[in-house]
Amino acid sequence: MVQYEILVSTLIAGLIIGYLAQRARMCFIGGTRDFVLVKDTHLIKAPLFFFIGAAAVFSVSYLFTSVPKWPWFVTGGLLPIAGAPLSTATTVPIWVHVLLAVIGGLGLGLFSVFAGGCPLRQHVMASEGDKSSMSYLLGFYLGAIVFTALILPLIIELLG
């Protein structure tokens, strides 16, 4: 019965987040792009409030839970996520994890700018019937599968 509760609560949370993202026209890339290019602040408000809300939720959850080494930028506890593919490799230095995250973030950001929006916005536009967003998401998920199946084992072999 617990699995159905998790499934239903996840579905409800996804519908609420999707509705709010659609109504707010939330897009991390589009807001930044419009602000830099034409000084339009309409789209940049949603990501700004997202980060403020995330900081508030993390701070409140920190008060009520025992999360070790949180926040990492204060305690110096920048550690790989337990269970991540490179987290078991004890010889891999922290800078490798940071470098891989930066490279991945730059790649995602670059292709999101080319596509005209972040993956969240692409999901919203695909649900509205935009065929270019659907093709973006097809490539997005196929790329995740290819990376996990083919490229990640090579990285682990090279670094581990």
Image (cartoon, grey):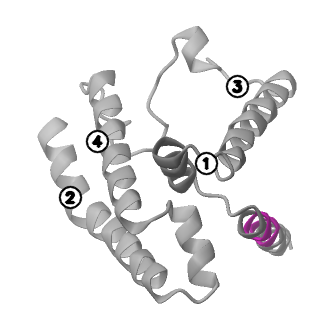
First along the sequence among labels 2 and 4: 4
* Residue on which the image places disc 1: 40
Q: What is the secondary structure assignment of the residue under circle 4?
A: helix
Relative placement, left or right, of 73 versus 90 is: right
Mark drawn on residue 67: 3
Q: Are marks 3 and 1 in contact (CB under 8 Å)?
A: no
Q: Give the residue drawn at x 53%, y 86%.
A: 130
First along the sequence among labels 2 and 1: 1
Up-down: is 145 above or below 160? below
Up-down: is 22 above or below 97? below
Prevailing secondary structure of the magenta residues: helix
* Residue on which the image places disc 2: 151
Residue stretch rendered in magenta on the structure = 13-20
* Residue on which the image places disc 4: 103
First along the sequence among labels 2 and 3: 3
Q: Give the residue drawn at x 68%, y 39%.
A: 48
Name the outermost residue toward the front.
Answer: 38
Q: Label 4 sits on what residue type?
A: Ile
- Viewer-nearest residue: 33 or 149: 33
